[in-house]
Image: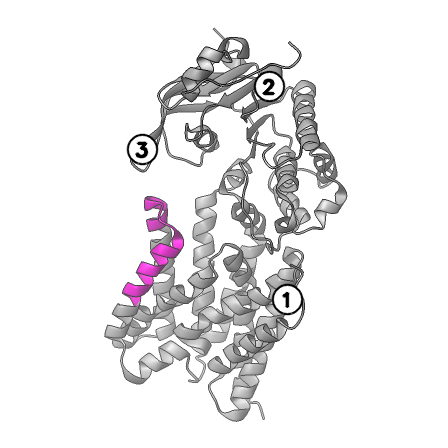
Amino acid sequence: MFTALDILSLTVSICMSVAAGLLGCFAIMRRMGLAADPMSHVALPGIGIALLLGGNPFLGALVMLLAGAVLIWAIGRRTGIATEAVLGVTFSVALAIGAAVTTGEELIDALFGSARALSLWEPVLGVAATVAVILFVVRFRNAMIISMVSPEIALTSGVKVARVDLYFLLAFALTIALGLRYLGVMLMGSLLIIPPAIARRFARNLNGMFAISIATAVLSTVSGTCIGILSHHQSGPLIVMIAGGLFFLSLLFPGRG
Amino acid sequence: MPQQNHLVLQVEQLSVRLGTSEVLHDLTFTVQRGEVLAIIGPNGAGKTVLLRTLVGSLAYTGMIRWAQDAVLGYVPQKLDLLRDFPVSGQDFLRAKAALSQAPTSQLISVLQSAGLDEAALARPIGAFSGGQFQRLLIAFALLGTPNVLLLDEPAAGMDQPGQVQLEETLHRLQQAQGMTLLLVSHELNLIYRYADQVLCLGRDHSCIGPPRTVLTPEALADIYGEPLRFHVHGT
């Protein structure tokens, strides 16, 4: 029923969902939930340019996302403009460039994810990137908690707020890059928003939020991927529909607020 | 002239610009160790901007020099958190304890100093009332044994008994541990009782001096732009 390649593919998608569930918690607490969507669009020109040059679209997306994260951070820091506004502008420009350089079926794959076969290095990169995101959260969890409450009290607690903001944006970009293969530019943002949004309704502390968010992301991803493999449908839209269904189901239960 | 090693803070010709307007202009003052400096002035005079600049949050021109051994604790003005913010009191305080390498046993003692009980650890901080959250911020500032506290209207949102308790706590800390306090407050009676120096920030000019010389009806009218009714209790 499932080939070795299917299981490998499932492993990579689980890695992606763990990273998305974890980092999405901080994104939503930093009021950057909606930023995941425009941020993922920054990958589009990278995909288009990589395809034009005959390179790997994932690497093109990764490079563009990391460069976009640094650009957004630098503009925000230099001008004091809110991250959301800088993201909005960067997103619009990136989308325009991406649409100009990417065409036909490749554009559809880039937007909604692709069912193409895994390259050998993809599982390795997927696991490595997930470990990097988890290590980032473990290392900077305390600094991020305090910065979210107040950058000033973070400064007096010895936190280098600007540096932590940059690291967060880079981890955010890495997480989005991880999911582009399955969910595409249009859908990846949803896996960073929906599981933490469910978790936020029920969690009384941060560990609780992490646990609920990761569990929801993994459940959506595993079930979406399995149904996709068995029914020969693309898994990306299925993953998002299942996550969305879980969100609406969760509304039937009283949250802690 | 105070000796340099008795100073915990030196500020010279400090100016801060926000956008096109200069909020602080050419401000010069010093703070001695163990001193209580009260900062007063009308709304928009730059009191909060001054504290934010002193903790390194805003760009400035001029000089700010903290003593090398200064450990700062900062209690900001009222913060707005969403009610479903899923960080508990314990998450919040443990984060500071970890960064400042304070023992976790200190969590309970700082909570008690700020007038909160152990139950605050389990509650999400978004669910705290305004006054309770202010107390939590004070507990947070006290973690890691700071020797300088910067407080921006710390009693805002607290009930009357809470305000009295806070005054006593701050006074006790200052007396027992020789802590230096920089306090933004509109409570002139409190300032008159506890402050060693008062820094008045007006829209046009500033002044500094002991309460007895600065908190006069004439000087206050000059700073606030209108006469203030001010009665010192018990004098």
* C-alpha span from label 2 to label 3: 32 Å
**Do marks 1 and 2 share a chain?**
no
Q: Does A191 sit left or right of B190 as displayed?
A: left
Q: Is residue A7 visible?
A: no
Q: Are marks 1 and 2 in contact (CB under 8 Å)?
A: no
Amino acid under disc 1 = Ile
Question: Where does label 2 land, which residue?
Answer: B189
Residue A84 sits in which quadrant? Answer: bottom left
Q: Position of residue B121 (x, y in %)?
A: 71, 47
Residue at x 60%, y 53% (from the top left corner)? B83
Q: Nearer the viewer, residue A236 or B69?
A: A236
Residue B134 sits in which quadrant? Answer: top right
Amino acid under disc 2 = Asn
Tell me which label, 2 or 3, sits earlier in the chain: 3
Q: Nearer the viewer, residue A7 or A64?
A: A64
Residue B57 sits in which quadrant? Answer: top left
Q: Position of residue B224 (x, y in %)?
A: 43, 21
Question: Where does label 1 land, which residue?
Answer: A212
Whether residue B134 is situated above or below residue A8 in the rendered picture: above
* C-alpha span from label 1 to label 2: 50 Å
Q: Secondary structure at mark 2?
A: helix
Q: Secondary structure at mark 1?
A: helix
Whether residue B39 is situated above or below residue A24 in the rendered picture: above
Total residue callouts: 3
Q: Does A78 sit left or right of B163 as displayed?
A: left
Whether residue A68 is situated above or below residue B170 in the rendered picture: below
Q: Which residues are magenta?
A: A74-94
- Looking at the rendered image, the quarter that the N terminus of chain A falls into is bottom right
Q: Secondary structure at mark 3?
A: strand
Name the disc covering residue B21, or none: 3
Amino acid under disc 3 = Ser
